Amino acid sequence: MIRRRAWWGLGGLVMAMAGCGPAPAPQAADGPRAEAAAEGPGASGTAGAAGAAGASSAVGAVGAAGGVKADEAPTPAPPPRSVFTPVAQVPAEIDLRLHPVEGALLVSTINLMTPEGEQIASAVGVLKDGKIEFPKRLHLPGWWVAVTGVHGRYPDQLDLIATGTTGRTGIAEHYVLGAQGWVRRVSDQGLSFTGVARMGSSLVGLAGPTMMGVPKFITLRGPRVGLTITPAPKKRPCRGWEAPLPYPEAEVRPRAFGATRDGTALSYGDGCSGESALEVWKPGEKGATLLPVPALIEGQSPDDALTLILPGPGEGEAWIVDGGVLHYKGGEPTPIDPPAKGAHVLTASAAPDGTLWAIADGALFARRGEAWEPAPLPDGVKAQDVAVGSDGAVWVAAGGAILKHGGAGEAAGAAPGTLQLQQGPPPKSRANRPIPRAGGPKCPQNLVVLYTFSKTAPDDYDFPLTRKALKGRTEFSPARFVVTRDRGQRFFAAFVPSWDLAKKLQERIKTDVQGSTPQIVCAEPEVVRDLKLDLKTGEVAR
């Protein structure tokens, strides 16, 4: 159904890559306890209204002189009334994801500070009597667990999928809610859930590799679904690597997974050619059909845009959301126009009647049939998240509040007039912080991540083993060696001007520095220090 973009940034990516291969040595190959980074609706027209008022005044003056009653200046039309009602207040700085399930509206967040001053790394809350409560039973175990989706019935039958971390690698996690709290059923290192689909009587998730490896189907409930992943070809290049591939790979590296209403499963992601592709499993078939996917938008999708596959209005239809929107129908994906000119779709949710609700640059839109319609929010607040329940209720997080429209019954909301909506942009999503993508020939800036710093490594550490391995290797002179920082973690890395040079540097360090497993990512992290190396001598230039 959805894939929430991973939250852990460059550090999490590099760490996650280590989970895909052999475990690195516990001590750094190049420094005191420094571990190898093997994971390594638009303006109202004020000027036009003023012009009309001026013209009307002039006409009125002439009319008055001639004894004719002057026309009044036209009154600007009031903004359209919103159908959404605020039902609960939340602190504006909290980044909430909405998860309507049978019997409740649940929310998830990370880095929660309770009124008692307790800091909770990851928590699930529930809407109750006009308030969002975060009972201890719904606190998630582990450190910085980002919820991807919640499915089922509250409070006795819930499945939750998330991306967690051990501090070294990302983990695809599946929890069920027990009497005392969340119980972990699945924990797969080096993977992250890209979505969940209902297929017959089964609830199935697809976990994709953070960087390298083969995706994996995980049956969460019901009979096992025996679908097969299409392997990458062995005799031709795939995503910038020459054949044979240095590790097992799939033809499509998934970024979102979902299904149509008739049970057709869809995986959307990066094909071997580097272009987007769709892997389609029709009902009753174990093998998949591969389809090329036309570009949704020009350029890169915004960092905070989610990648989603949602059920469409018809039995064999689906929406594919990735900055723009594709309509999968009749076995073909077709791009549709954005909700507003130049707007990027940041997130979306599909209603039972087939309506697609989407947020584009803070505004809410609904697509019914072949056209988008603006859905104004109270006081013009900016939307942060939208989710539609099985009863048709549309929930929106906006203006430091939870808003609601429709559904089987009225929400048990706060007393009228007690909620204060807050203007301004919604908080940047921490749970959706993107992972830098894999490096490759089309990446504008390849970065070879060489090592992580340990907590005890000095700030001016100069990596003697790396310098020894590079001594005399002047072909790497175009590289810029730097210390970078992401979420408080420091890394030794190198910006390189080409994919070929990045691969050569990766292989050199991997071969000559024992225990190292450098990785190539497409990223431009914060640089805290340049390490100027004289590659002729292997010394640091002072």
Image (spheres, rainbow, N blue to C red):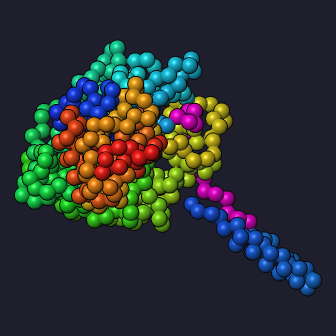
Expressed as whole percent of the image width and height from the top left, the position of residue 155 reads 36, 23
Residue 81 falls within the magenta-colored stretch: yes
Please give the name of the residue rendered at 45% of the width and 33% of the height, measured from the top-left corner. Answer: 459
In which quarter of the view is residue 332 placed? bottom left
The residue positioned farthest toward the bottom in the image shown:
66
Total marks placed: 0
Please give the name of the residue rendered at 74% of the width and 66% of the height, measured from the top-left corner. Answer: 75
Q: Which residues are magenta?
A: 75-94
The residue positioned farthest toward the left in the image shown:
235
Tell me if residue 458 comes above or below residue 115 in the rendering.
below
Please give the name of the residue rendered at 63% of the width and 40% of the height, measured from the top-left corner. Answer: 421
- Which residue is more in the foreground, 535 or 206? 535
Main secondary structure along the magenta-highlighted residues: loop
- Which residue is more in the foreground, 1 or 260? 1
Please give the name of the residue rendered at 74% of the width and 75% of the height, measured from the top-left corner. Answer: 52
Residue 533 falls within the magenta-colored stretch: no
Relative to 230, 182 lies left or right: right
Residue 377 in view, yes or no: yes
Relative to 127, 100 lies left or right: left
Q: Quadrant of the N terminus?
A: top left
In which quarter of the view is residue 91 placed? top right
Expressed as whole percent of the image width and height from the top left, the position of residue 148 reads 34, 37
Residue 387 in view, yes or no: no
The residue positioned farthest toward the front in the image shown:
537
Q: Quadrant of the C terminus?
A: top left
Expressed as whole percent of the image width and height from the top left, the position of residue 417 reads 66, 36
Expressed as whole percent of the image width and height from the top left, the position of residue 212 reads 20, 44
- Which residue is more in the foreground, 170 or 482? 482
